[in-house]
Image (tube, rainbow, N blue to C red):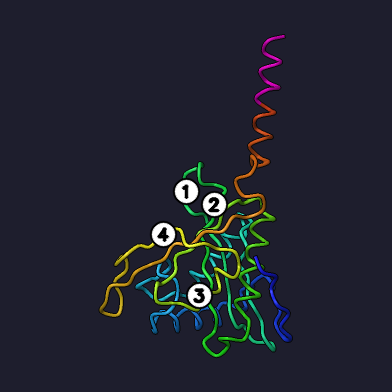
């Protein structure tokens, strides 16, 4: 992954409840204009209490929910959620990233996405998945620059604004990826070996 360029005036930090209104404005602009990741599209409006509840749930699971602040204004946000609920997928996350329309091409994504990747890797996760509108070339280029590869093309999986939309599935390895066993697995294996040793004495 390319190192994130230093952009003056941009600060990446955890989101707070005070950021909720700004994040909703960013999200709704993307939905109205058909730009964003098709995996996170919602027909109903995203309400402040809903977003606050989601943030609280993410924090309880130690999942990152970040904002990019530029010159004191929330210029973008990104977060990650479990890819699937079943235990076998517990090391894989799905992410979303949104940038304020007035701050496009200002390096927000190139700071925000690597910070999200780093936070998820630090949490012990091993893979990150994303779904991107196939027509959103800027987002596809951003993800590829940050180490994602295209792993699937899903034709006509979304219907919005009176048309069918394709989605591109992208994936990025976190930390050591699949090169070794996760630490929790090693701890569980050691515990099982210890129990077996006690049982045979």
Residue 135 lies, in percent from the top left, at 40, 76
- Relative vertical location of residue 201 with respect to residue 41 in this rendering, above or below: above
Q: Does the magenta run of residues contain 198?
A: yes
Residue at image point 54% right, 47% down: 90
Characterize the local packing of mark 1: few (<14), some (14-19) or many (20 or more) Cα atoms within 10 angstroms.
Answer: few
In the picture, the disc for residue 75 is none
- Relative vertical location of residue 58 with respect to residue 28 in this rendering, above or below: above
| Residue extent of the magenta highlight | 192-201
Characterize the local packing of mark 3: few (<14), some (14-19) or many (20 or more) Cα atoms within 10 angstroms.
Answer: some
Q: Does the magenta run of residues contain 69?
A: no
- The residue tagged 1 is 85
How far apart marks 4 and 3 lie (CA) works out to 15 Å
Q: Mark 2 and mark 4 in contact (Cβ < 8 Å)?
A: no
- The residue tagged 2 is 92
The quarter of the picture where residue 154 lies is: bottom left
In the picture, the disc for residue 152 is 4
Q: Is residue 130 left or right of residue 161?
A: right
How far apart marks 1 and 4 lie (CA) works out to 21 Å
Which mark sits nearer the N-terminus, 2 or 1?
A: 1
Query: Which of pointers 4 and 2 indicates the residue nearer the eye?
Result: 4
């Amino acid at each position: 992954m390319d190192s994130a360029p230093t952009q003056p005036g941009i600060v990446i930090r955890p989101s707070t409840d005070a950021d909720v209104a700004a994040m909703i404005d960013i999200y709704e602009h993307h939905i109205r204009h058909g730009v964003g990741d098709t995996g996170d599209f919602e027909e109903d409006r995203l309400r402040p209490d809903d977003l606050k509840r989601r943030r609280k749930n993410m924090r309880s699971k130690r999942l990152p929910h970040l904002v990019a602040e530029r010159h004191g204004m929330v210029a973008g946000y990104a977060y990650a959620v479990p890819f699937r609920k079943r235990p076998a997928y517990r090391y894989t996350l799905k992410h979303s990233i949104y940038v304020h329309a007035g701050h496009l091409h200002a390096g927000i994504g190139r700071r925000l996405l690597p910070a999200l990747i780093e936070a998820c890797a630090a949490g012990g996760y091993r893979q990150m998945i994303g779904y991107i509108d196939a027509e959103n070339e800027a987002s596809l280029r951003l993800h590829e620059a940050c180490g994602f590869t295209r792993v699937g093309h899903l034709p006509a999986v979304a219907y919005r604004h009176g048309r069918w939309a394709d989605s591109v599935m992208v994936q990025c390895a976190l930390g050591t990826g699949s090169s070794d066993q996760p630490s929790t697995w090693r701890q569980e294996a050691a515990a099982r070996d210890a129990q077996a040793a006690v049982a045979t004495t």
